[in-house]
Every structure is written in structure tokens, then in C-alpha cells.
Image (cartoon, grey):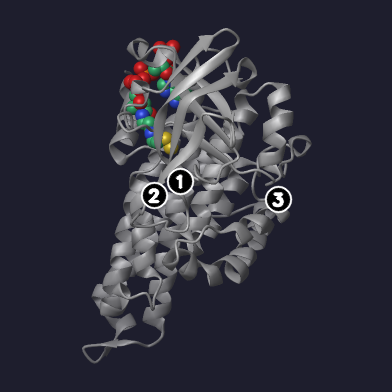
Amino acid sequence: MILDEKHKEFRKKVKEFADKEVAPRAKELDMNSEFPWDLIKRMAELELLALYVPKEYGGAGLDVFSYAIAVEEIGRVCGSTGIFLAAHSSLGVYPVYHSGTEEQKQKYLIPMARGEKIGSFGLTEPNAGSDAAGTQTTAKLIGDKYIVNGTKRFITSGGVADIIVFTATKDPSLGYAGISAFIVEKGTPGFSPGKEEDKLGLRGSMTSELVFEDCALPKDNLLGKEGEGFKVFMGTLDGGRISIGALALGIAQGALDASVKFVKENKKSSGRLMKKMQSIQSRIAEMATEVEAARLLIYQAAMLKDNDLPFTKESAMAKYYASIIGTKACDMAITIHGMLGLTNEYPVERFLRDEKLMEIGEGTSEIQKIVIARQILGK
Ligand code: COS
């Protein structure tokens, strides 16, 4: 796809960072389940952590398109670093930027955008995943404080985050209308990270429980209006899906690049040069076409958002398509590599493990299809 000069230059800058600094760390981050503190510091220095946030709030003052490019380029070499960037920017930074008061922006957005504080987003619960309106965590206004009780699960960066935006309801029987969004800071009495998940992929990213036990939050920690938390979160997920699509795309591109490199190294199979084999050509052609189609969907969703046009359907399509073709591309990459593809001598087994999470996180493929169908058919 043709990019304008501004985005071309930007891609070059991020690609250089990804190749020189992120790629050499990717294997060990995965193998040691190591959180990429050093790379986060570098991303902060390069102003990558809040690309579409205006400079006055600590961001880079660019656009969502640039953000999608950044996640794609970093995801191409390291899914774990890519998911950190996506979760921090889309799920930590965005809701405060979009729905926060000026005071909240000064207090929470600026340090997150500058990378001084890590952001996270608490929606999913042990009994409320796809059914986001089924939130059981409660926030009851007693005097001038909200008293929060409940547990969140599978929260990206939850265990390391300084600032967490989360949902809670005043009464679970009210459904989505009872849900509000709040901000909690690490160290607040009654709030603590719970167990860390031991995951298939994205092993360099942390996925944690968050536990609230009579956690008292001042009224100032309400984000947006009372009872509008579900909408704040749905709007946040619309944008988040662009970045998960971009991450899925980046990983798929990584799998394609690795396959092309492998085939071009004049490798032979059954005595024949691999690049001359029709079965290999067919796989490479299929992967390349689908990766390009995913890219167009993602860039389209980003451009719609940048132009303040509706993009709910397009971001769901982008995430749905990119994650499905991404898993397929990684699977094909392993097939192309043969037995070597199953070893950690090559990155493709890591790509497949990381990519599988893209089909599930930030809304499963089934949820994306519901969102797309409702946009087309009405509810
Ligand atoms: N942006 C803003 N508002 C939205 C919205 C969006 N994208 N989607 C829905 N809403 C609003 C609706 O307009 C409705 O408000 P009104 O009654 O005032 O019109 C309200 O929210 C409830 O919407 P709806 O009735 O569609 O809610 P459902 O419970 O049926 O939600 C889905 C259905 C599947 C869309 C929702 O539960 C969902 O997205 N679940 C997946 C959650 C997820 O992705 N989790 C991943 C982990 S978080 S990282």
C-alpha cells in the first residue's frame, strides 16, 4: 500500500528500532517470560507510547494510522513487546484521553503518555468475558467514596500497571446501565494484583488478576459519567481492535518474512529447490495476499478513526480478519520450515503461539462477528 511521506518516514524509524533493538530481545523475553522494561523505556524515549495523543498531554501528536504502523512493526519481531504497546496505548491511555476530566488528564494521562507510568484496563472477570455487561465487580457509593469489591481476570500488564481503568457496577442486576468506569492507582489500599497467568504465547507480557477488597476510591476517580462505563469501554475496545489487528498483522508479516528467508536460502526438499516447488509457491502467495488484505482493512479502520468517522464495524473486521489469517500464516510458516519450524532455532513457533492470542484477546472472533453483523443488520 502506498504511504505518504510522513507515514513512510515514521515506519522507517520504527522498523529500525524494531530490527536493531527489539528483535534481538524477542527470543529471551519469550523463553524467560521476561517483562520488557528496557524496551518500554526506549519506546518512551522514542515517543511511541501515546502516538495519537496531542503533545500538550505528553503524546507524540501523530495519528492512529501511525500508531497502527508502530504496533505492526514491533509485532513483526516481538509479540510480547507489541502487546504491551497496544494495551498501554489503546486501553490505558485512550479512555483517560477520551473520557477524562482535565484534572484526570493532568494527573493520569500525561505520565502514562510519557511512559513514566504504565497503564492497564480491567474489564474481564472470571464470570464476565465476552458478556462484558455481566460485570460482577461492585462499586457502591457510601458517603463520598466508592467502595469496590470484586476480581478482574486476564488483565494485560495488570500486575505491573501504575494506573488501571476498570469497570464496576452499582448493582449487577442493572446490566450495562449499572456499570461505571473508574481509575485506580497501584498501592491504593484494598487493591492488589492477584495471580499471574502462565500463557501459551506473549510470554514476555504479564497477564494478571486484579483483586478489590473494600477498596475505597474518591469520587474523583470516576471516569466519565456514572452509568456510562459500558459505553466508555465499548468505545475503547473499538480502537483497541485496530491495534490488536495491527499486532496480528505484524506477527503474520514476521511469519511470512521468515518463510521467504528460509525458502530463499536455497533450501532443498526431496532434492528440489524449495522456491521452485509449487506447493511452497502456493503457500507464500496465499500468505502474502492475505497479509496485504489484512493491512488494508487495518489502515482503513485507522483512517476512519483519524477522520472522526464511524469505525466500529471496520475495526472489528480488521481484528477478526487479521487474527484469523495471521494464525493461518504462522501455521503455514511452520509447515514450510518442516521440523525446524517446531524448534526455537527459528521464530515461527513463537509467532504461532503469540498469534493465537490475537483471535481471543480484546474480543474473540465470535464477538467480532456479532459486532460486524449488528452493524450491518441492526441489533
Ligand atoms: N461504542 C459505544 N457504545 C456502544 C458500543 C460501542 N462500540 N457498543 C454498544 N454500545 C452501547 C449501545 O449503544 C447500548 O447503549 P443504548 O442502549 O443507550 O443504545 C449499550 O452500549 C449496550 O449495548 P448492547 O445492548 O449492544 O450490549 P450487549 O451487552 O449486547 O453487548 C457485545 C454486546 C458483544 C458487543 C459486548 O458485550 C462486547 O463487545 N463484548 C466483548 C467484550 C470484549 O471484547 N472483551 C475482551 C476483553 S477486554 S480487553
- Name the front one of labels 1 and 2: 1
- Per the image, the residue denoted by label 3 is 47
Dots 3, 2 in contact, CB < 8 A: no
Q: For mark 2, what is the residue?
A: 322
Q: Nearer the viewer, residue 299 or 27?
A: 27
Mark 2 Cβ and ligand 1 under 8 Å apart: no
Q: In the depicted view, which residue is nearer to us: 125 or 83?
A: 125
CA gap, disc 3 and disc 2: 26 Å
Q: Is mark 1 within 8 Å of ligand 1?
A: no
Identify the mark nearer the N-term, 1 or 3. 3
Residue drawn at 41 percent across, 57 percent down: 291
- The residue pinned by badge 1 equals 244
Q: Mark 1 and mark 2: span between their CA atoms?
A: 9 Å
Q: At 63% from the left edge and 61% from the top edge, which residue is drawn?
A: 38
Where does the image place residue 95, in percent across and percent down from the top left?
A: 57, 30
Three-letter code for the amino acid on which mark 3 is drawn: Glu
C-beta proximity under 8 Å, tags 1 and 2:
yes
Mark 1 or mark 2, earlier in chain: 1
Q: Position of residue 299 (x, y in %)?
A: 52, 45
344 lies above or below 176: below
User: Circle 2 sits in a helix, a strand or a loop, which is it?
Assistant: helix
